[in-house]
């Protein structure tokens, strides 16, 4: 037999027990720090990932349960956009709109002395289209013209209103009104990109 083992066997029982306890403690410590702690850390990480995935699944389920409502909101927003775009004509519709303004003015009993479109002023997604207007008629026909312009399906702002040549021939007061009519048109993305290139 090995002399070291014989030497151990000859030790008193208390020393043998102490060596055995030391060996068990060393092995236990090695197992704890070598196997148990890394597995615990891995388990904790996996539980954290599982909790995150469960939260993500719950969020996706909440969104999926709201999908019909979101689709309905999308359709409503789409209709609202179409309605808003009817109030902002595109480039092709501007001449028609300007013709509508003159028709409304003549229908109210006014004579157009000046109708001069000015250069557009581009903004973010729209452009302002100003037009210098000078009309002649009675005060009521001019007021009816402004009211009719306000009732057009397109947005038209009347600003810089000035009255001149107020006359009263035959008991009717006639007046010449100079103003700036500003309408707006929708600027398409293609136009915006072309403007940026220039």
Image (cartoon, grey):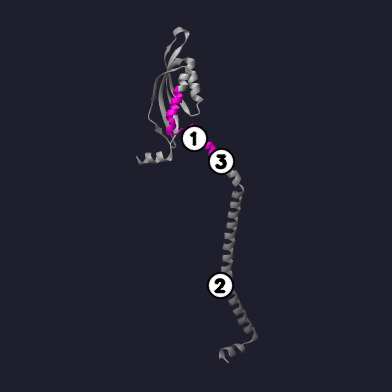
Is 88 in the magenta? Answer: yes
Residue 114 horizontal/vertical position (percent): 39, 21
Q: Residues within 10 Å of mark 2 (few under 14, many from 20)?
A: few
Magenta stretch, overall SS = helix
Q: Which mark is residue 85?
A: 1
Q: Nearer the viewer, residue 137 or 162?
A: 137
Instruction: Tell me the residue at 60%/87% (across/down).
Output: 8
- Residue at 41% x, 22% y: name it: 133
Q: Which residue is mark 2?
A: 34
Q: Residue 193's quadrant in the figure?
A: top left
What residue do we see at 60% from left, 45% from top?
68
Q: Nearer the viewer, residue 169 or 95?
A: 95
**Magenta segment: does it hold 65?**
no
Give the percent coordinates (x, y) of residue 82.
51, 36
Image quadrant assignment for residue 126: top left
The residue stretch that appears in magenta: 74-102
Classed neighbour count for the residue bearing mark 3: other residues with Cα under 10 Å, few (<14), some (14–19), many (≥20): few
Of the 4 image quadrants, the one containing the N terminus is bottom right
Dot label at residue 75: 3
**Callout 1: few (<14), some (14-19), or many (20+) C-alpha neighbours within 10 Å?**
some
- Label 1, secondary structure: give it: helix
């Amino acid at each position: 037999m090995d002399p070291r083992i014989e030497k151990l066997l000859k030790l008193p029982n208390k020393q043998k027990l102490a060596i055995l306890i030391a060996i068990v403690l060393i092995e236990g410590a090695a197992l704890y720090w070598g196997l148990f702690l890394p597995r615990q850390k891995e388990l904790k990480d996996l539980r954290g990932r599982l909790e995150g995935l469960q939260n993500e699944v719950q969020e996706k389920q909440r969104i999926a349960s709201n999908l019909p409502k979101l689709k309905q909101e999308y359709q409503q927003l789409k209709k609202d956009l179409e309605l808003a775009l009817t109030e902002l004509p595109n480039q092709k519709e501007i001449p028609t709109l300007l013709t509508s303004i003159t028709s409304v003015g003549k229908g109210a009993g006014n004579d157009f002395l000046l109708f001069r479109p000015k250069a557009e002023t581009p903004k973010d997604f729209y452009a302002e289209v100003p037009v210098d207007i000078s009309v002649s008629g009675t005060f009521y026909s001019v007021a009816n013209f402004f009211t009719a312009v306000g009732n057009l399906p397109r947005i038209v702002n009347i600003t810089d209103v000035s009255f001149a040549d107020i006359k009263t021939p035959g008991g009717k007061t006639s007046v010449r009104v100079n103003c700036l009519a500003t309408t707006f048109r929708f600027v398409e993305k293609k136009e915006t990109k072309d403007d940026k290139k220039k």
